[in-house]
Amino acid sequence: MRVFAFALYSLALAVVFVAVASGAKADTAAGEASFKRACAACHNATAEGPRKMGPTMHAVVDRHVASVDGFKYSNAKREPDMKWSAENLDRYLANPREFMPGTTMAYAGMKSNSERANLIAYLKTLK
Ligand code: HEC
């Protein structure tokens, strides 16, 4: 009986684990879909892809602001001594022009907290 209970317990744990793991995956998949819809027209996600209107988002998380070689940033971006931590990205993407007045990024902002969280989870995978 004990062995049976233990087996049931292990099975339950495995189910919970799979649910959590696939939940995390769903977030980055949703984030990738948001990226394609809202950002990919102006931003590449790879290190070697062609230059678009904005700098590549490859390895952007924890990258220093305005540090993609050869990209002509606005003064708004060149001034702050700051990294793109997940928290800064969250505030920037919610309202780019409020967080960084004068930025030339023509994007109004992503209002949904959960959509931004998924998007940033996806950006973390771009290494
Ligand atoms: C209409 C084009 C456009 C869209 C849409 C756009 N961006 Fe940008 N983005 C830019 C430009 C241009 C810059 C450089 C701005 C500057 O120098 O002030 C930039 C800069 C950035 C930076 C700073 C990069 C660095 O190296 O410091 C981040 C982060 C960023 N964008 C993320 C995003 C994300 C995520 C989305 C989608 C939600 C998005 N952008 C949508 C054009 C765009």
Image (spheres, grey):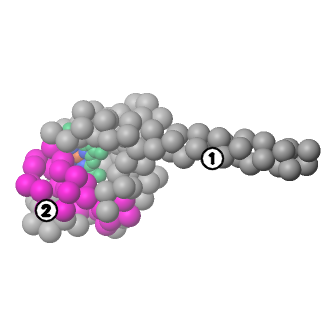
Q: Nearer the viewer, residue 58 or 19?
A: 19
Q: Residue at x 15, y 43 (%)?
A: 42
Amino acid residing under circle 2: Glu
Depicted 80 relative to depicted 3: above or below: below
Assess mark 2: CB under 8 A from ligand 1?
A: no
Residue 102 visible somewhere in the drawing: no
Q: Residue at x 66, y 46 (%)?
A: 14
Name the spot of residue 101 as percent of width and height, x first: 28, 46
Relative to 8, is 114 on the left or the right?
left
Q: Earlier in the sequence, mark 1 or mark 2?
A: 1
- Which residue position holds label 1? 17
Stretch in magenta: 42-66
Name the spot of residue 89 as percent of width and height, x first: 38, 50
Name the spot of residue 63 as percent of width and height, x first: 32, 65
Relative to 4, is 102 on the left or the right?
left
- Which residue position holds label 2? 48
Which type of secondary structure does the marked residue at label 1 adopt? helix
Which quadrant, please, contains the C terminus? bottom left
Q: Would you say the magenta stretch is mainly helix, strand or loop?
A: loop
Q: Marks 1 and 2, how far apart in space?
A: 36 Å
Q: Residue at x 40, y 31 (%)?
A: 111
Relative to 1, is 48 on the left or the right?
left
Residue 30 visible somewhere in the drawing: yes
Magenta-drawn stretch contains 48: yes
Please tell me how crowded label 1 is: few (under 14), some (14-19), or many (20+) other residues with Cα within 10 Å: few
Name the spot of residue 53 as percent of width and height, x first: 10, 47
Q: Quadrant of residue 5?
A: top right
Which quadrant, please, contains the N terminus? top right
